[in-house]
């Protein structure tokens, strides 16, 4: 029977390879929000792939044997779920160059295959032993997550809104001296970013102007407030 369901066992892990180039394009932090959404979608997809492959496998297995598989239904469900999730983490680790975790998980899986051949003659027990080793490999990859980026270790590409969000989180007064946009940025995107900055600066200047006018009896001009705001409101990205 395992030869009959073998293609479905392989399919529940091979699907992750289709998204290698997508994960590689998202390696830089250009679109962090989109990357988080994409990763969440892949986690959901790993569960759906496991479910579809499990249904096809148990249908083919039941028709092939002509009888109820009993506890094997549950064993196969766990196998497909763990294998599909492991495939997702493996392709992520490969795109992020986490080779140590990949090597360790691969050795655990090889040990599981050897244990299945030597420890038990029963097919169901062999599957259960292999699931145990797959779960260990899954645990290793989850613990061996991506390393935290060291500030200044390498350039980070951020979108305009993400850059402004990091500046806001910094908290201290900062100064804009130059703002260079990449030649690849379209004119419409550059204009949108410039208008966004102008609105933020004008809003802060108006609030400072109102506060200064109230404290000085109306002797503060708006130009001075804008100059003060642009001198301490934001900073250019590194």
Image (cartoon, grey):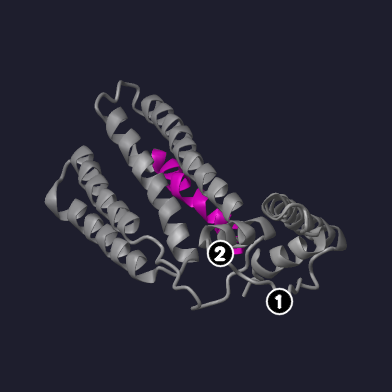
- Please report the residue visible at 49 percent of the width from the left and 51 percent of the height from the top: 14
Magenta segment: 5-25
Secondary element type, mark 1: loop
Asked whether 6 falls inside the magenta stretch, the response is: yes
Disc 1 target residue: 177
Asked whether 94 falls inside the magenta stretch, the response is: no
Secondary element type, mark 2: loop
Q: Position of residue 212 (x, y in %)?
A: 69, 55
Determine the image quadrant of residue 160. Answer: bottom right
- Classify residue 104 as left or right of residue 208: left
Q: Position of residue 157 (x, y in %)?
A: 62, 68
Check residue 211 in the rendering and tell me which mark sits there, or answer none.
none
Disc 2 target residue: 27
Determine the image quadrant of residue 79. Answer: top left
The front one of 203 and 35 is 203
- Classify residue 177 as left or right of residue 191: left
């Amino acid at each position: 029977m395992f030869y009959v369901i073998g293609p479905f066992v392989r399919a529940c892990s091979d699907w992750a390879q289709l998204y290698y180039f997508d994960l590689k394009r998202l390696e830089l932090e250009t679109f962090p929000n989109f990357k988080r959404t994409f990763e969440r979608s892949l986690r959901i997809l790993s569960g759906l792939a496991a479910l579809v492959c499990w249904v096809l496998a148990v249908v083919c297995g039941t028709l092939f044997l002509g009888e109820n598989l009993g506890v094997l239904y549950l064993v196969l469900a766990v196998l497909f779920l763990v294998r599909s999730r492991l495939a997702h983490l493996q392709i992520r680790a490969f795109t992020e160059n986490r080779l140590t975790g990949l090597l360790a998980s691969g050795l655990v899986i090889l040990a599981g295959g050897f244990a299945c051949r030597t420890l038990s003659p029963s097919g169901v027990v062999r599957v259960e032993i292999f699931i145990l080793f797959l779960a260990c490999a899954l645990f290793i990859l989850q613990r061996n997550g991506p390393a935290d980026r060291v500030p200044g270790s390498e350039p980070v590409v951020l979108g305009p809104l993400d850059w402004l969000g990091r500046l806001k989180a910094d908290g201290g007064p900062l100064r804009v001296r130059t703002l260079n946009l990449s030649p690849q940025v379209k004119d419409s995107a550059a204009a949108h970013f410039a208008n966004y900055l102008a609105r933020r600066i004008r809003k802060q200047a108006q609030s400072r102007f109102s506060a200064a006018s109230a404290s000085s009896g109306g002797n503060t001009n708006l130009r001075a407030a804008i100059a003060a705001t642009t001198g301490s409101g934001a900073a250019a990205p590194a």
